[in-house]
Amino acid sequence: MDRVSRHPMVLYYLLLGAALALLLLGLLMVLSASSVLSIRQFGSPYTLAQRQGLFAVAGVVLMLIATRLPIVWWRRMAWPSLIAAFALLGAVLVIGVEVSGQRNWIDIIGPFRLQPSEFAKLAIILWSADLLTRKQATINRWSHLLVPLLPVTGLILLLVLLEGDVGNTLLLAIIVGGVLFAAGAPLRLFAVLGAVGLLAIAALTIAAPYRMSRFTSWLDPGADRLGDGWQVTQGQYALGTGGWWGVGLGASREKWGSLPEAHTDFIFPVIGEELGLIGTLTVLVIFGVIAFVTFRIVQSATDPFMRLAAAGIGTWIIVQAVVNIGAVLSLLPIAGIPLPFVSYGGSSLIPLLIAIGMLLSFARTIGGPVATSSRSVDTSRPAPARQSSRGKGAGRTPQGVA
């Protein structure tokens, strides 16, 4: 596998195939999992699936556009995207609508809503990758490393937390941690930030009774199967009844009302029920392919911005998938985070597809005939020189720092 991944454009097609496979599976499962709810709310089993199809088409178009954009364009979008994220997160607190106890949505047109915290993930990746690229020479000095990264990130986390969205707050913090790790930040920094994060999580859990009940139900779901442990219990029932091959596509019983959020946060149990263990393992393998390709991009990139942005995107996708699936399996507390590319929701799907487009752009740069720098394009460099940069430590040497 390692030898195959070194061939030109293999990373590109592996990533494209994995992303499209998850997207198609997601469209199919949203159609199945949302059909009963869609009939109850709209009188048609296809309404929610049709909306997801529109989100997918828009996301794929943006993804294809993103694949053609050079690194320098992504760097230029760092500050505008961050400013837009702040504006949208601030607007939520003023004109946002509350859904399931969280004020994190903005009404757009008709039934369509926007969740700014999902787009903030992409914005913080672009901005932090650009910032740390400029600070490569002083990465070991905490004063340069954390300013303005820490206060800006902290303000974004605070805005998302004020919406009541603890799950995305933690995910944003982990994404920034992934970018810092790829930048070569000192390990003792992660020990300090990790300790602060654990204290913050404990305080937030104790402060809100519903979070405390989620935590206690995670420790012992069987203690209150008809109350706080209901969702996890029903999800595990769905996974358990699927067997090896599942009960058949569209034949889920849990989606008829027993399993809350069957088409969003808990779509993974429906996959297990209808497609069986083979279906769930297939999903895990596809996420594994995305993780592998992202790692290879980070390892092979000679441009520091490319390396840091790819690390942030990889952290985003894989950690979000782990948190979602971990909650379903009762390995982690429920965080209210959708399964990437699969769960219903345009606010989650479209930024993810744009991020995949960015990774595809990086893969084209690595696998194409010319290596593109963030400062200039060197068309005179022969192909063997580009391959030789992939040796030991190639992904850790800062080059083309702006």
Image (cartoon, rainbow, N blue to C red):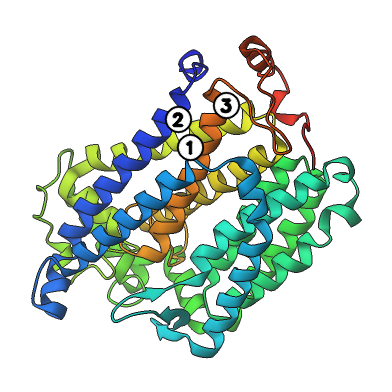
Closest to the observer, 281 or 69:
69
Return the x and y of residue 209 as percentages of the image width and height.
51, 83
Question: In the image, what residue occupies the spot 33% across and 80% down?
Answer: 109
Closest to the observer, 299 or 261:
299
Query: Helix, strand or loop at disc 3?
Result: helix
Residue 218 to residue 386: above or below: below
Whichever of labels 1 and 3 marks the residue nearer the N terminus, that label is 1
User: Does residue 223 appear in the picture of this structure?
Assistant: yes
Image quadrant in which you'd find residue 214: bottom left
Q: CA distance from mark 1 to mark 3?
A: 10 Å
Whichever of labels 1 and 2 marks the residue nearer the N terminus, that label is 2
Q: How many marks?
A: 3
Image quadrant in which you'd find residue 262: bottom left
Query: Helix, strand or loop at disc 2?
Result: helix
Query: Helix, strand or loop at disc 1?
Result: helix
Q: Amino acid at mark 3?
A: Ile
Return the x and y of residue 19 as percentages of the image width and height.
37, 41
Q: CA distance from mark 1 to mark 2?
A: 6 Å
- Residue behind mark 2: 12
Q: Amino acid at mark 1?
A: Leu
Question: In the image, what residue occupies the spot 12% across and 69% down?
Answer: 36
Q: Quadrant of the C terminus?
A: top right
With 376 as the anchor, is 309 left or right in this view? Answer: left
Question: In the image, what residue occupies the spot 28% across and 58% down?
Answer: 267
- Residue behind mark 1: 360
